Image (spheres, rainbow, N blue to C red):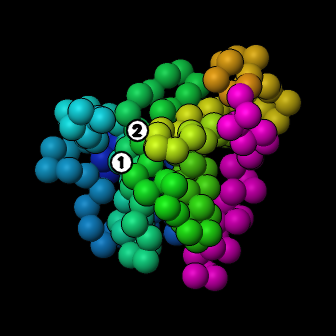
Amino acid sequence: MRALSGSFGPVRDAPELPQAIPAAPRAPLSDPTPDAARSASGDVVAGMLRIRAIDTGRSDLDLEIVEVRREPRVSVLRVRGLHARSTAGSRWLMCMFNTIAVLRGFDHWTAVYPEAPSEDVLLGFPSGPNDRMAVIDPRFGTRWALGVTAPIERGIRLCRRDAVER
């Protein structure tokens, strides 16, 4: 176990994550203001997540995730480059969604992808594989919802493979 920190601030002890966020990133994960991310308006919001692909060792991907709103069981993520992403970019996003679930203290996640041009992804955290997010939050009952609940254990295995196969 290790404590993670960065633009998302101090976090509870988390399991070692498989290359999703390297122990020594090539570039800092934060803006000049520590423990902060920028909201849609550009304002600094303390305690929110900001992850750039280049900071995780993926200089071949032009993707950035900024948490613009946090609710008890949902993170609203602005994903710059969402609609122009490659297959490798989609896999990186899945790995980062898994990492965010771990950082937020959840064991499962699901998502609702937006219709273009919006880049705001809803990342939901059900309490288990049988917990229906659409009952908890009607935004997860739309045709844009992922439709599956991903356990973090499976994501950790897939992301470990992603680090090896790039």
Residue located 43% across and 57% down the image: 81
69 w.r.t. 102: above or below: above
Which amino acid type corresponds to the residue marked 1 in the rendered image? Arg
Q: Nearer the viewer, residue 1 or 110?
A: 110
Q: What's the residue type where badge 2 is placed? A: Glu
Residue depicted at 67% across the width and 74% down the height = 161
Q: As displayed, is residue 3 above or below residue 36?
A: below
Asked whether residue 68 is drawn in magenta, I would say: no
| Viewer can see residue 21 | yes
User: Residue 116 placed where, x, y %?
Assistant: 52, 44
Q: Residue at x 78, y 32 (%)?
A: 128
Mark 2: few, some, or many residues within 10 Å (few <14, many ≥20)? many
Residue drawn 26% across and 40% down?
38
Residue marked by disc 1? 50
Sooner in the amino-acid sequence: mark 1 or mark 2? 1
Label 2 belongs to which residue?
67
Asked if residue 131 is positioned above or below residue 150 in the image, the reply reads above
Which residue occupies the extreme bottom position in the image? Answer: 165
The stretch of residues the image draws in magenta is: 142-166
User: Where residue 44 sits in the image (x, y, percent)?
Assistant: 20, 35
Compute the Cα span from label 1 to label 2: 6 Å
Viewer-proximal residue among 82 and 150: 82
Q: Are marks 1 and 2 in contact (CB under 8 Å)?
A: yes
